[in-house]
Image (cartoon, rainbow, N blue to C red):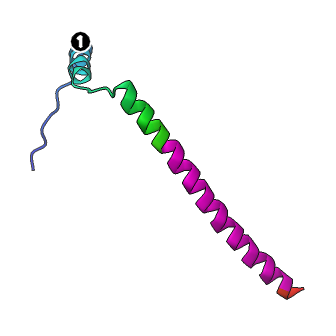
């Protein structure tokens, strides 16, 4: 097996590569950003309510189990 030797990239070449890649980025519009933020907030509320329910159910089961032991 032959290992290929990688040549080191100069600082100037690195900066040029970063600029080229940054130019390819498609930034979201304000409307897309707001829509995504609202979706994330709604999803966060739904998940927090779900986990509140699961936690409460497990808490009730543990309290019942502890009550049986006393």
**Residue 65 within the magenta-colored segment of the rendering:** yes
Residue drawn at 55 percent across, 49 percent down: 44
By secondary structure, the bulk of the magenta-drawn segment is best described as helix
Q: Quadrant of the C terminus?
A: bottom right
Read off the residue under disc 1.
Answer: 12
Task: Please state the extent of the stretch shown in magenta in the rendering.
Answer: 40-67
What is the quadrant of residue 10 in the picture? Answer: top left
| Residue 29 position in % (x across, y down) | 34, 26
Q: Is residue 47 above or below residue 4?
A: below
- The answer to whether residue 7 is above or below residue 4 is above
Quarter where residue 55 is shown: bottom right
**Few, some or many C-alpha atoms within 10 Å of disc 1 (few <14, some 14-19, many ≥20)?**
few
Q: Is residue 42 left or right of residue 1?
A: right
| Residue ranking furthest to the right | 70
Image position of 60 (left or right of 34): right
- Residue 10 is a magenta residue: no
Q: How far from the left and from the top, in percent, is residue 45?
A: 58, 50
At x 66%, y 61%, the residue is 52
| Residue 57 falls left or right of residue 41 | right
Q: Nearer the viewer, residue 15 or 38?
A: 38
Residue 22: give x, y in percent of width and height: 26, 22
Residue 17 position, x and y percent, is 21, 20
Q: In the picture provided, is 4 more to the left or to the right than 23?
A: left
């Amino acid at each position: 097996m032959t290992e290929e030797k990688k040549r080191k990239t100069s600082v100037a070449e690195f900066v040029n590569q970063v600029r080229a890649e940054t130019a390819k980025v498609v930034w979201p519009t304000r409307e897309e950003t707001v829509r995504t933020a609202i979706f994330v907030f709604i999803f966060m509320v739904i998940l927090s309510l779900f986990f509140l329910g699961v936690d409460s159910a497990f808490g009730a089961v543990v309290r019942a189990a502890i009550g049986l032991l006393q």
